[in-house]
Image: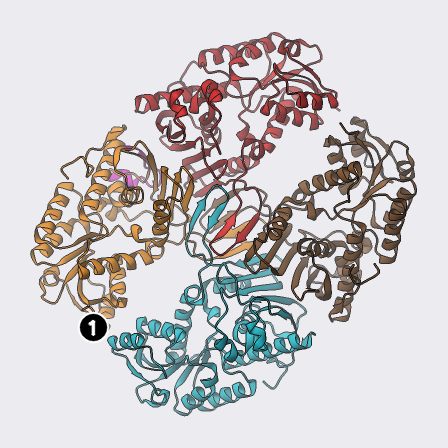
Chain colours: A cyan, B red, C brown, D orange
Amino acid sequence: MKKKVRLGIIGAGRIGQIHATNVLQSPQAELVVVSDVYFDSEVQARLHSYGVETTDDYLTVLRREDVDAVLVCSSTDTHIDMISEAAANGKHVFCEKPVSLETAKTKMAIAKAEAQGIALQIGFNRRFDPNVQEAKAQLEQGRIGALHSLRIISRDPAPPPAEYVARSGGLFKDMAIHDLDMARYLTGKEVEEVYVRAACLVDPMFATHDDVDTATTVLTFTDGTFATIENSRRAVYGYDQRIELFGEKGMIQVGNQQESTVQISGEGHIESAKPQAFFLERYATSYRNELEQFLYAITFGGTVPCTGKDALVAEELADACRLSWKEKKPILFTARPNTSKG
Amino acid sequence: MKKKVRLGIIGAGRIGQIHATNVLQSPQAELVVVSDVYFDSEVQARLHSYGVETTDDYLTVLRREDVDAVLVCSSTDTHIDMISEAAANGKHVFCEKPVSLETAKTKMAIAKAEAQGIALQIGFNRRFDPNVQEAKAQLEQGRIGALHSLRIISRDPAPPPAEYVARSGGLFKDMAIHDLDMARYLTGKEVEEVYVRAACLVDPMFATHDDVDTATTVLTFTDGTFATIENSRRAVYGYDQRIELFGEKGMIQVGNQQESTVQISGEGHIESAKPQAFFLERYATSYRNELEQFLYAITFGGTVPCTGKDALVAEELADACRLSWKEKKPILFTARPNTSKG
Amino acid sequence: MKKKVRLGIIGAGRIGQIHATNVLQSPQAELVVVSDVYFDSEVQARLHSYGVETTDDYLTVLRREDVDAVLVCSSTDTHIDMISEAAANGKHVFCEKPVSLETAKTKMAIAKAEAQGIALQIGFNRRFDPNVQEAKAQLEQGRIGALHSLRIISRDPAPPPAEYVARSGGLFKDMAIHDLDMARYLTGKEVEEVYVRAACLVDPMFATHDDVDTATTVLTFTDGTFATIENSRRAVYGYDQRIELFGEKGMIQVGNQQESTVQISGEGHIESAKPQAFFLERYATSYRNELEQFLYAITFGGTVPCTGKDALVAEELADACRLSWKEKKPILFTARPNTSKG
Amino acid sequence: MKKKVRLGIIGAGRIGQIHATNVLQSPQAELVVVSDVYFDSEVQARLHSYGVETTDDYLTVLRREDVDAVLVCSSTDTHIDMISEAAANGKHVFCEKPVSLETAKTKMAIAKAEAQGIALQIGFNRRFDPNVQEAKAQLEQGRIGALHSLRIISRDPAPPPAEYVARSGGLFKDMAIHDLDMARYLTGKEVEEVYVRAACLVDPMFATHDDVDTATTVLTFTDGTFATIENSRRAVYGYDQRIELFGEKGMIQVGNQQESTVQISGEGHIESAKPQAFFLERYATSYRNELEQFLYAITFGGTVPCTGKDALVAEELADACRLSWKEKKPILFTARPNTSKG
């Protein structure tokens, strides 16, 4: 039996807690320590009950001898420091997306990780959704022949609070970035042009932060095929996460997961359950899977399934989207791995 | 080009009007005359505008030289006389179900039709539903291997008026008779035993007519497999007409046809449209198909697709169902074609 | 009772036959004469059996005293002449889309119809689909609040023959034109900008006619909201016709109509029926409805539900789409009714 | 914070492992020891890695001071001894269904548990399925008014091995018992009569064990309403677990959970995923919920949500079903809690 991977987690918010639970349930890993600047006392107590240490100093996490790898779940503006320090200390890193709000910094962090030979995996959790995996497998088995177009619907159930929006990097870098990554992941294609139409229709608050809440994006790939992405910060019926792959020999659709299988037929109509509320429910399995593959990669030395470079391209695409929105015109995308110095 | 079949219709109520419309649209038939004791003036005017004669005397319909066949759409208690007179005059007959409320009379009518060599087709319209046809074709092509069990859900949207109930012959002979016929038609099997549990749950009016409004029926076939039928006189969500065939290699389901394909996702749930309201909508195509096949049979001399004998067995099964309900015990069914003198 | 409208039909191809059948079944109309340059003998015989005259000279149709209105179902390049001649003879016109391949000519035809005071209705049949009508009604009743975005999927089951493509006016004017009209019809909004990405992915034949077979279109409306349209000349699974309206308080979806309600559960998966094959099946009811409303308008003098101006805007949008495809950039659309002299 | 419940598990087979995993992940419980006569070495190693002791002697589990309660997951024939010994040692018991194959013994075990004041919860896991819970909640809130009929479809994906069948107690006591319990649980009604038709259609092996593999059961409740249950030992398309509640004001349906939300539209038809394979996947959440409620009851002293008496009635119903099958007639059911001495 392989020795367990000893993990530290930085950031004990919503996403940090998800990862903590998954680590505690994993037979491959041991949760040694969790840091947070402002710990929720209940969360802290629960961690202690499992024998996990807690601290308010992330540096102690990154420098402990008995920690092999860290999960960076703190706010985006801290990621670069965390990755740099982790690299310096030879700790493998799993980092939530985006790596940073400035691609220059992201590049630097990737370079440091490479220089120190640590693994750097980025949390594009949707790649690990079993439904997405099934769709990708069917596509790669030629089930629908050559891919002609792709459509991604990605709508949140409700907007985040204003303070989150203020520091989020905006709809494209905070939210659409998942879909930009998904488009590359599913198709295996690179983007040549980005065209965006976006607006502030849900809440004027977004405009005050120079942001939008609704967007339609067209990606043109280098082979001349295209994808559309539709984003909204508020779908009152729940977390709307659908994908449609259309091709030569048919269509593959990934539907929403509903809250229950109960259906009620009444006098007016037939009712079925809404999509599951939000990412914690919808992507619960994805979070477990991405952790498992991270642990596998650092245990057996393989490549992580979602690299810093993937994060960088997604961030650059998000920048191009923003530019297209601002300038109201299509933006040629030359930052793609095959053409740029990356 | 074959000469058109010249048709008369007896009875210009709801079902008679359906048939009249279909005859008027058929290139194979010509509608000569329609009779009704109490004609709706608007219906009469519409018929006249198409050059169709009307009368209040059904005998003139049955005795006209220029009528090749008649569609009997009058009330059940008149069917026997109509068939007898039609047979005497050499007119082919399409008769609505049931033939009569007494199987002895039904047998007599069948005998007369046979003696005179006229075609006698019974209006078990559901046999002609394209969805049912598709299900039967799949079954017969071995798609689910040997059939293990069958389930039929058959619920009306709302109960008929008391005066109709009074003369209907009761739930089994008026309503479940369609499902009893469907069970034989789909499976090609004959029934050995009938077990019914029934109750008056929708409206006490039914009880005052010695009738029920809700029933569950188990049919055991001679090969030891079984079917269940669920009937209700009121499904508030619409006309519920579903079939489930379960077998060795899978399951075939026939679903409801919905009023529209529109789906609305709101704050509480996802809404889709109810099943189509009632038989006129749900089985519109079936009515056209049964007419077409009747016309084909009398034009080219083949067998009609639903015979007087089929009607007789269904009526006998309905009697057995009623007996099972009354006596609260399973009833051996010996009237089936293969065992009885029929 | 109102006198029946006496109709002539010009063109007895696929769509002309549909209209002929519907006229023959309508109590409001009488089909007097049908013209075609090359008549199919079976079609001609069938028309004769209903007492309909036939001719190979459309002028006789347009000049007959006993014809009140004509349905123009001949090839696109003849429409302008037909409308002009009909106007000169005071006949109301129902004309298939597009009116012409040159908007200048379309404007002229509209002007002539207006000058002569004849009704001119254009055959954007999808407007009359009961599912579309239900979606529009729900939208207008405020069911999803303010509309944020619209998506139209419109894919044909198989490409038309090369000779059809050669004279079709191209994907945008022949096929997407329905969707461009639908976007205006459903939303009640006018377009400000068009952006198209298109390619030849189904069959290189399209490229030889300077045409494409696959396209994604983004329409930006004057209020800053947007719509996307996805077209393909070949969806192997059938005629894919879906609509999604997303708004403040929810989502309205119009789904495909399937060939049957039969579902088969087998060892590998659950199978359900494909969408109905093509427009003749999918929009059968729409064709009946548009005829009925045309007859109503010319009988009672109201406005037709889909005007020449609607056709003109759709044609101008199709031109803008083509330009966007060719120039690979967004095209400002200034031809809209509210801004142009139209 | 409440002290954790210290648990022992007897039996480390498929179901015992499920419970072990859930206990290990529960913050309310501590897994102290697991016993099995023939331990799988990998299972044993995994338990040791979590600090859980293992033994081949169940008595040591039942007699340890540091065990508060036990989960009995051993074969049915051992349950009575386990419960008796647990009661004698004051340990609370969660026992898998059925308690025993002889109702006299089940009564005795219940009596012993009551005499010693220990909690006795039975593992009718489906009661705890969130979909079932939602359906029951809707029913109880009056969503469909008075309940008229109930239908339960319960089909296994594949038959168990012959040695399992030999000791299983037969289809009714081993498999249908879940559905018999479900009928009582959902409706809150007691059964008055049982009627069964059953056959050996899947595998003749069942007949050699005096058993059947296919059955249709009609339960008549004391209020005159009824339920049907359809069982099969083999549905090639997966674990078929559906419920339909029909009532005065509508219908509630509980559908299957599918393996994925992926749908593929191809040339022949549209494919969607099969139901989840079997009970471990389909009822994963139910197993967690029943454990949680057991822990809650023994911690805070409330009633367990599924009692020994519930098990007894279900076993008596299973006996009545078998009798009905054997004697081919309806069986009056007088063993129900309200009429029997129980």
Residue at disc 1, secondary structure: loop
Q: Quadrant of residue C180?
A: bottom right
Residue lying at 72% horizontally and 27% vertically, measured from the top left: B27
Q: Position of residue D93 (x, y in %)?
A: 16, 56
Which chain letter goes with mark 1?
D
- Please, is residue C297 above or below residue A228 in the view? above
Residue lying at 19% horizontally and 70% vertically, measured from the top left: D52
Q: Which residues are magenta?
A: D194-209
Q: Quadrant of the N terminus of chain B?
A: top right
In-front residue for pair B164/A123: B164
Q: Is residue B293 left or right of residue A67?
A: right
Question: Around disc 1, counting alpha carbons within 10 Å, would you say few (fewer than 14), some (14 to 19), or many (20 or more)?
Answer: few
- Please, is residue D245 above or below residue A123 in the view? above
Residue lying at 10% horizontally and 52% vertically, measured from the top left: D84
In-front residue for pair C1/D204: C1
| Residue at the disc numbered 1 | D51
- Name the kind of residue labelled 1 in the image: Gly
In-front residue for pair C236/A260: A260
Q: Quadrant of residue C317?
A: bottom right
Residue lying at 90% horizontally and 34% vertically, measured from the top left: C64
Q: Position of residue C131 (x, y in %)?
A: 62, 46
The answer to whether residue D201 is magenta is yes
* Residue D36 visible, this orientation: no
Q: Position of residue A72 (x, y in %)?
A: 41, 81
Q: Quadrant of the C terminus of chain B?
A: top left
